[in-house]
Amino acid sequence: MGTGGMNGRIKLDWAKDAAIAFVNVLKNQPPATQQNMRVGIVSWAGNNYRVGTLNPTNNWDSVISYINSITYQGNTDNYTCMECGLVKAGALLSTPADQKVIIFMSDGIGNRIVTSCTSTNSSSCTLAEPCTNNTPLLTHCPLADQAAINAASALKADGVDIYTVGYGSRVEPITILENNLQAIASDPDSNYYLYGGNENNWANVFTQIAPRICTLGPTTAALPTTIPPTRLTPTADAHVNGSHTTTATNYGTAAALSIDGSPIHITYMKFDLTSLATKTVSKATLRLKVTDSSTGTQRIKSSSNTSWGETTINYSNRPALSSTVINNIIGGLSGNWVQIDLTTFVNANKGRVVTLAIDSTSSDGLGLKSKEAPSEKPELVVEH
């Protein structure tokens, strides 16, 4: 955890409060419900680790005491290794169990890669040198992102359920990569990924997770019925190419979309939001499958022009874009999903047909699947 915080507290203090709140939910359940529970803790900062054993839950006080004993490890290089935390947690869950669960709290920014990290008894992992400034996020390394996602995939294949809790700013300057946390989670939707927001909301988020992973007693209030999200695919999508020989070429039937700053490639998508006119939107996420990796930043904008046609749009007749950036896509690895929060935009435009456009000033272009792809098409996931 970083040293920033609120009211003079470091983030670690708020995280400890959240973990204790979670344990207290379990502690207050009937003995029959608690009978087979085991809880362990993994904390990490830089290459320093604290690993707590899976404590029998007939001694909850020992679990809480361990959480309280975690202290800031003096990480001065500002690098953390998401993969390490997942590997350590997975090792704790190596014994057979009816249900295995990891709750993983992070900003989703990878910047260290493991070269050796297998034992829960060691105090540290052997780490490769940190990547430096490969994207606009300080010390962010896309390879470390992928290493963490791969570690999570191996755990999920072994039957581990992974919940992720994200923290950091969703607006400029962005300090969270939610697409990584959603990829690490067992499912990218809100059942497995929760945004923690401010530090003083973390305890509330953790206590929301507890009923989802346990059969709780009758004294526990039931969670509200979850309404399935609305999933919208574009009614039209295409990219335009600013190369001097192809300005009149249409790419509307292509299975891929392209964004680039040199030569200029701009992607356009049209979404019909009329079905949302009377709904209260709590979150809207644009999900895009990457086909060509990029470390650049792509900018999502809107256009007031919704009359363009998928099979007629080209660079010469392309709709003008708003100068306002709705959100950014910061890098992306081939084969991964990128997921971008568009909640404010969707709330402001529900009930309408809208045009989204993605451009870039980076010469490291990004490729995406289009709605013409046989699978993994773009989608706007709207929770309400």
Image (spheres, rainbow, N blue to C red):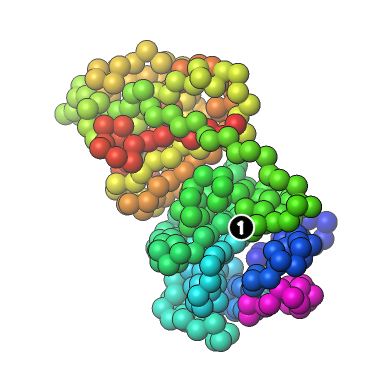
Give the residue pinned by disc 1.
213
Q: Position of residue 142 (x, y in %)?
A: 42, 59
Residue at 32%, 52% in the rendered image: 334
Task: Kindly identify the amino acid type of the residue bearing the numbered disc 1.
Answer: Ile
Which residue is farthest front? 32
* Residue 203 falls in image quadrant: bottom right
Magenta residue span: 53-71
125 versus 202 height, above or below = below
Q: Quadrant of the C terminus?
A: top right
Residue 58 falls inside the magenta stretch: yes
Q: Quadrant of the N terminus?
A: bottom right
247 versus 110 height, above or below = above
Residue at 82%, 60% in the rendered image: 8
* Residue 141 falls in image quadrant: bottom left
Q: Mark 1: few, some, or many residues within 10 Å (few <14, many ≥20)?
A: few
Residue 2 visible to the viewer: yes
Which residue is more in the foreground, 291 or 175?
Answer: 291
Which residue is more in the foreground, 171 or 287?
Answer: 287
Residue 368 falls inside the magenta stretch: no
135 versus 377 height, above or below = below
Q: Is residue 160 shown left or right of residue 360? A: right
Which residue is more in the foreground, 294 or 93?
Answer: 93
